[in-house]
Amino acid sequence: MATTPLTLSFIHHFGEMGSRWGINRTVGQIYALLFVSRQPLCADDIADALQFSRSNVSMGLKELQSWQLVKLRHFPGDRREFFEAPEDVWEIFHTLADQRRRREVEPTQSMLRVALLHTPSNPDEAYAQQRMREMHDLIEQLMGWFDEVQKLSPETAKQLLDMGTKVTKVLELKDRLTGKTPRRKPDASDAAA
């Protein structure tokens, strides 16, 4: 794949962002290249395009496969393995969200459930356990909502996203009418409204 200044800019940015998201820069850049590529690429093509060693590309592809973010393809008469990113950005989002949940949220939920089964031995431990319960309950509520959103079709999910600010304004109006405290602090955009 011939890289242009535009695609290189995206690839480099994605590598930098990847390091902030907990994946290494090389993996982020490999994924960005596969994402913008019109056709599946083999490891040699990726190494040439990004000027990475073949071993770094192989390790990066293994990492992307473990995250289920790339699809493996074979072509008749060619023994090489080719890789591509899913076409549908919603599929990518779902995969990332599922993987992050499995790797990050579920272990925390499990630890909190175990911690809440213990009987506190003193007031400090009771206070700490109550704080853990608040965290547990919020995570459970968010994951319940997340499960429902994951079931939506991409079209319905897009509509839900488009409704986001409208729903927030309706809830804020409801709060004002019922005398409840605001859900968020007002910002500059509220003054303009």
Image (spheres, grey):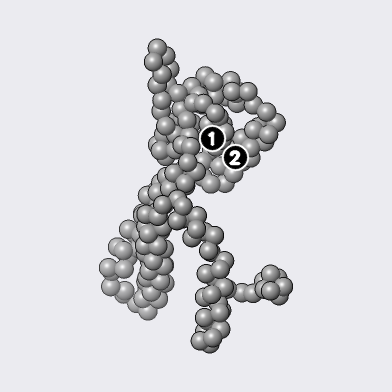
Classify residue 16 as left or right of residue 41.
right
Q: In which quarter of the image is residue 6?
A: top right
| Circle 1 residues within 10 Å: few <14, some 14–19, many ≥20 | some
Q: In this view, does 78 lie above or below 83?
A: above
- Amino acid type shown at disc 1: Phe
Q: Position of residue 175 (x, y in %)?
A: 52, 81
Q: Where is residue 11 in the image (x, y as percent from the top left)?
A: 61, 35
Residue 143 seen: no
Badge 1 marks a residue whose secondary structure is helix
Q: In this view, does 46 lie above or below 27?
A: above
- Amino acid type shown at disc 2: Phe
Q: In which quarter of the image is residue 48?
A: top right
Q: How many marks?
A: 2
**Reading the chain from its start, which is encountered first: label 2 or label 1?**
2
The residue that disc 2 covers is 14
Q: Residue at x 56, y 79 (%)?
A: 173
Residue 67 seen: yes
Q: Residue at x 53, y 64 (%)?
A: 164
Q: Nearer the viewer, mark 2 or mark 1?
A: 1
The image's mark for residue 35 is 1
Q: Nearer the viewer, residue 148 or 117?
A: 148
Q: Do the residues labelled 2 and 1 touch (CB within 8 Å)?
A: yes
Q: Residue at x 41, y 67 (%)?
A: 138
Q: Nearer the viewer, residue 116 or 62?
A: 62
Location of the C terminus (image quadrant): bottom right
